[in-house]
């Protein structure tokens, strides 16, 4: 584990967001440009005046809150997907049911499957006829 300063560790692997809070506080802010809708801009200006806080701070707090909320939602969605996959895998560990269902579907619909293809006979030439007869043998 490396250190950013004597009291704040900065892990390089196996980290979580909470470990980095002190580290990010020491990082300089990066300027970026984003367009706000006019009504949002007016509301932000009013909030800034009434709360006596810089617009930049209000924007950072709002974006941080949004990112945290959406991250939690995404994490819950991904966890649910992983749980469903694990559950499915445990029900059919060797995929035997899936393979059986696939084979049954192939057998049932093989005659109507356009991917199965059909041999088309075209105008016969002596070389083609000879090659086809050799291949069909």
Image (cartoon, grey):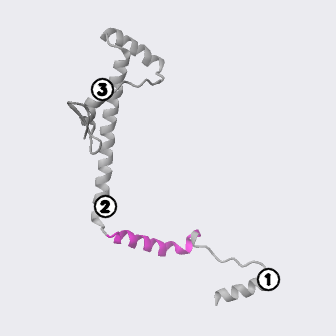
The residues bearing labels 3 and 1 have C-alpha atoms spaced at a distance of 82 Å
In percent of the image, x 29 and y 44: which residue is there?
13
Residue 136 position within the rendered picture, expressed as x and y whole percent measured from the top left: 65, 87
Side of 57 relative to 41 (left or right):
left
- Quarter holding the N terminus is top left
In percent of the image, x 43 and y 13: which residue is there?
42
Q: Give the mark nearer the N terminus: 1 vs 2.
A: 2
Q: Residue furthest left?
A: 7
**Looking at the image, is 37 positioned above or below residue 81?**
above
Find out whether the residues at labels 1 and 2 contact each other: C-beta distance under 8 Å. no
Side of 92 relative to 41 (left or right):
left
| Observer-nearest of 47 and 121 | 47
| Observer-nearest of 3 and 108 | 3
Crowd rating for badge 2 (residues with CA inside 10 Å; few <14, some 14–19, many 20+)? few
**Residue to which mark 3 is pinned:** 26
Q: Give the mark nearer the N terminus: 2 vs 3.
A: 3
**Looking at the image, is 107 positioned above or below residue 74?**
below
Q: Give the mark nearer the N terminus: 3 vs 1.
A: 3
Residue bounds of the magenta highlight = 94-114
Foreground disc of the pair 2, 3: 3
The residues bearing labels 1 and 2 have C-alpha atoms spaced at a distance of 56 Å
In percent of the image, x 75 and y 77: which residue is there?
122
**Residue to which mark 2 is pinned:** 88
Crowd rating for badge 1 (residues with CA inside 10 Å; few <14, some 14–19, many 20+)? few
SS state under label 2:
helix
Crowd rating for badge 3 (residues with CA inside 10 Å; few <14, some 14–19, many 20+)? few
Residue 56 position within the rendered picture, expressed as x and y whole percent measured from the top left: 37, 18
In percent of the image, x 77 and y 84: which residue is there?
127
SS state under label 3:
helix
Give the quarter of the image for residue 18: top left
**Residue to which mark 1 is pinned:** 125
């Amino acid at each position: 584990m490396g250190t950013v300063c004597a009291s704040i560790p900065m892990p390089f692997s196996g980290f979580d967001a909470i470990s980095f809070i002190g580290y990010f506080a020491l990082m300089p802010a990066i300027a970026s440009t984003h367009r706000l809708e006019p009504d949002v801009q007016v509301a932000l200006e009013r909030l800034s005046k009434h709360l006596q806080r810089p617009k930049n701070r209000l924007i950072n707090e709002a974006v941080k809150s949004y990112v945290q909320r959406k991250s939690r939602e995404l994490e819950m969605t991904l966890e649910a997907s992983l749980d469903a996959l694990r559950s499915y895998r445990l029900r059919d560990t060797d995929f035997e049911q899936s393979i059986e269902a696939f084979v049954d579907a192939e057998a049932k619909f093989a005659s109507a499957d356009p991917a199965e293809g059909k041999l088309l006979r075209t105008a016969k030439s002596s070389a083609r006829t000879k090659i086809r007869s050799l291949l069909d043998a």
